[in-house]
Image (spheres, rainbow, N blue to C red):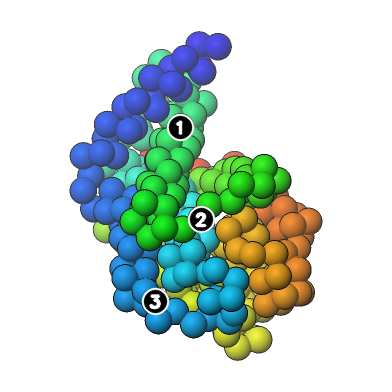
Amino acid sequence: MNALAIGLDRTLVELKMYSREKEAVFFGFLFPVLMLALFSMIFGDGFTEGNAAEDGVTAARFFLPGMAAAGVMLTSFQTMAMSVATERDDGTLKRLRATPMPPMSYFLGKVGLVVVTSLAQFALLLLVARLAFGVELPTDPGRWLTFAWVFVLGVAGGTVLGIAYSSMASSARAIGALVIAPTLVLQFISGVYFAFADLPDWLKQVASVFPLKWIAQGMRSVFFPEQWQRAEMAGSWEHGRTALVLVAWLVLGLLLCARTFRWTKRGTT
């Protein structure tokens, strides 16, 4: 209980520090919201993907699932990788390890940061989509239940993978390129900015290895008409496989964290 209480306090500290980092707030929090607004205004009434007009799918509704999936990745994986690497490089982790604070409280603080920012970002996405672009949100409780487990598994997996990935960087300067490049590529091949059905088959297979594709597919099952599942690789939303892949990545992330996490920089004690 003491570790949990300290973890809650640590979450507040993490949120305060995060809010002061303008670059992190923009690229991790506001970027998906701004991209949704940008794409919605660019395509507007001229959006013609599939049977969009007949099925009531506007540009904003089409891009909403992808931006929600990208937001999960950016606020979990990218934020964790960059913040933990920076704290390791500047000695923050070493100093924290020397305090009476339980190590678990540090990680609980990071988890709390990701959960709060991810939920706030998604709420803002929905607000922009509904009020600014008139997107009709789902009314079926089953769809929101699907969103809940996709969101939880995506955030959990992204968080532990980000913490593990932070150990790849030799310094805080290097982590930016190591994180931003692969996350940008994954967004382009996972159905975030383009219709996943329009990608070459071999690129779909590559994307299917990584969790972002499955998070985006799960989000599409929440916000797209039911008949649009025919455009997926298997002709269905594949909720069972989505859950299996996301759980597998979560377990892998936990194992990598246990084996690779360090409180100090390489070559130091």
Q: Residue at x 49, y 77 (%)?
A: 194
Earlier in the chain: of badge 2 and badge 1, it is 1
Q: Is residue 38 visible?
A: yes
Q: Looking at numbered disc 1 in the image, what kind of residue is underneath it?
A: Gly
Of marks 3 and 1, the one in the foreground: 3
Earlier in the chain: of badge 3 and badge 1, it is 3
Residue density around tag 2, few if under 14, some if 14–19, many if 20 or more, within 10 Å: some
Q: Secondary structure at mark 1?
A: helix
- Quarter holding residue 242: bottom right
Quarter in which the C terminus is drawn: top left
Earlier in the chain: of badge 3 and badge 2, it is 3
Q: Secondary structure at mark 3?
A: helix
Q: Which residue is mark 3?
A: 45
Q: Residue at x 38, y 24 (%)?
A: 10
Q: Residue at x 78, y 56 (%)?
A: 240
**Could you say where residue 189 lies in the image, as x and y percent from the top left?**
52, 76
- Quarter holding residue 193: bottom left
- Quarter holding residue 210: bottom right
Q: Nearer the viewer, residue 59 or 146?
A: 59
Residue density around tag 3, few if under 14, some if 14–19, many if 20 or more, within 10 Å: few
Q: Which residue is mark 2?
A: 136
Q: Nearer the viewer, residue 238 or 104?
A: 238
**Could you say where residue 39 lies in the image, as x and y percent from the top left?**
36, 71
- Give how far apart the Cα atoms at labels 3 and 1 are: 39 Å
- Give how far apart the Cα atoms at labels 2 and 1 are: 30 Å
Quarter in which the N terminus is drawn: top right
Q: Looking at numbered disc 2 in the image, what kind of residue is underneath it?
A: Glu
Q: Which residue is mark 1?
A: 112
